């Protein structure tokens, strides 16, 4: 015996019928809310209600001479049964749907509807200009919303010019200070002391910035002190300010010491495409294993050189894959082999990786993988 097909529209239950009687006349509920409470689609609810004789909305009786915005009803009978003949204040006559009149969709003809209804319906109050103290008429909600009111643009410009001359904003002062010759000479001398090299990554090919150990805004006396500056490249400088917003000199030490960088020369291997099956078990290809062991050994040597310990806090990773050809490779699969190879060598577990920046580039002569690992702020609870 074949299975019985389910009915598209199953029969109404007693509970659904009682809910229909209870909630259908409630006009505060929306169509979705009504369908959710009864447990049927709104189409089937409306069909059933019309059969039972339930009415959802009270019909508004429209008489001759009733006003709806700019419209005045002149004739109740029109060419269509649901329409009324209306006359606008400007003199145009038109057949308008009864529903659009009662709901407020149509308030007048095209010309009258384009007029600003604020002059007719919105309250206006008298206000004084903040600069020249001239009396003005403004819409009430706008006057309450704005702290200052102006009669024209010239008053507005002069008012704010005077205000900023007396008490200029802080960012404008600091911007001017950074353009002074004293600041430029300080930044140049910091770069010379650093040997035009980034303190963190040691690169010289990147654009450099002069970084303050103590904050530029909070410690104004130490702004041009040569002991209060360090040379950092632009990517490292931006990364530092993203991690440490309210920083101290100790934060820079933590930022620079918990940093690891290696360059692995050779072709990349992806893990997902190199699984093999034998004796009902999957195992990794020997080429991928060799790639992982070589990367692990290189990482161990660099960790000993730099004197770094195993990272146990959340970390960031910047990886650039220089590929030998344009053959199709998924960058996430390349990243998976690198993350697994450095697991329990550089960091305790690969679940500690919170931020990843990946790039795939072409280099036919020298295929390699450049890896940079940095520790995030352990006090930041967003990273875990």
Image (cartoon, grey):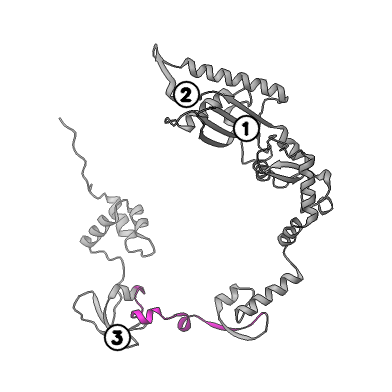
**Circle nearer the viewer, 3 or 2:** 2
- The residue beneath circle 2 is 271
What crowding class fits label 2: few (fewer than 14 Cα within 10 Å), some (14-19), or many (20 or more)? some
Taking the magenta stretch, the answer to whether it contains residue 261 is no
- The residue beneath circle 3 is 92
Q: Which residues are magenta?
A: 103-130
The answer to which of 279 and 360 lies nearer the viewer is: 360
Q: Is residue 221 above or below residue 60?
A: above
Sequence-wise first label, 1 or 2: 2
Residue 4 falls in image quadrant: top left
- The residue beneath circle 1 is 372
Sequence-wise first label, 3 or 2: 3
Q: Which mark is residue 331?
A: none
What crowding class fits label 1: few (fewer than 14 Cα within 10 Å), some (14-19), or many (20 or more)? some
Residue 276 falls in image quadrant: top left
> How far across and how far down the image is residue 241, in percent?
68, 45
The residue depicted at 23 percent of the width and 64 percent of the height is 53
**Horizontal relation, residue 288 to residue 17: left or right:** right
Q: CA distance from mark 3 to mark 2?
A: 76 Å
The residue depicted at 53 percent of the width and 19 percent of the height is 291
Q: Quadrant of the C terminus?
A: top right
Sequence-wise first label, 3 or 1: 3
Taking the magenta stretch, the answer to whether it contains residue 119 is yes
> How far across and how far down the image is residue 374, in percent?
65, 34
Of helix, strand and loop, which one carries label 3?
A: loop
**Horizontal relation, residue 39 to residue 321: left or right:** left
> How far across and how far down the image is residue 228, in percent?
81, 45
Q: CA distance from mark 3 to mark 1?
A: 75 Å
Q: Is residue 21 above or below residue 303?
A: below
- Residue at the farthest front position: 365
Disc 3 and disc 1 in contact, CB within 8 angstroms: no
The answer to which of 108 and 363 lies nearer the viewer is: 363
């Amino acid at each position: 015996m074949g299975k019985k097909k389910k009915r598209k529209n199953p029969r109404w239950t007693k509970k659904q019928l009682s809910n229909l009687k209870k909630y259908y006349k409630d006009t505060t509920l929306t169509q979705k809310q009504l369908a959710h409470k009864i447990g049927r689609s709104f189409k089937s609810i409306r069909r059933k209600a019309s059969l039972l004789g339930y009415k959802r909305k009270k019909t508004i009786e429209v008489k001759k001479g009733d006003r709806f915005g700019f419209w005045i009803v002149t004739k109740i009978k029109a060419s269509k049964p649901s329409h009324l003949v209306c006359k606008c204040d400007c003199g145009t006559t038109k057949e308008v749907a009864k529903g659009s009149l009662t709901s407020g969709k149509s308030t007048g003809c095209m010309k009258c509807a384009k007029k600003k209804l604020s002059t007719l319906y919105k309250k206006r109050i008298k206000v004084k200009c903040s600069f020249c103290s001239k009396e003005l008429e403004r819409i009430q909600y706008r006057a309450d919303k704005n702290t200052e009111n102006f009669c024209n643009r010239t008053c507005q410009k002069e008012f704010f010019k005077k205000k900023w001359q007396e008490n200029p904003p802080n960012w404008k002062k600091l911007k001017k200070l950074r353009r002074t010759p004293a600041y430029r000479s300080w930044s140049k001398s910091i770069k010379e002391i650093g040997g035009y090299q980034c303190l963190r990554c040691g690169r010289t090919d990147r654009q450099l910035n002069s970084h303050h150990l103590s904050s530029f805004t909070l410690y104004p006396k130490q702004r041009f002190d040569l002991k209060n500056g360090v040379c950092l490249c632009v990517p490292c400088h931006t990364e530092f300010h993203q991690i440490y917003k309210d920083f101290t000199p100790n934060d820079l030490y933590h930022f620079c010491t918990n940093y690891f960088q290696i360059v692995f020369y050779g072709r990349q291997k992806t893990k997902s495409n190199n699984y093999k099956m034998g004796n009902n078990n999957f195992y990794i290809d020997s080429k991928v294993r060799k790639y992982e062991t070589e990367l692990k050994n290189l990482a161990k040597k660099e960790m000993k050189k730099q004197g770094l310990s195993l990272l146990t806090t959340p970390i960031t990773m910047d990886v650039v894959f220089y590929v030998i050809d344009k053959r199709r490779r998924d960058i996430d699969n390349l990243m998976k082999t690198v993350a697994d190879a450095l697991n329990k060598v550089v960091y305790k577990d690969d679940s500690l990786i919170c931020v990843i920046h990946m790039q795939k580039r072409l280099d036919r002569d020298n295929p390699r993988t450049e890896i940079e690992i940095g520790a995030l702020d352990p006090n930041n609870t967003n990273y875990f």
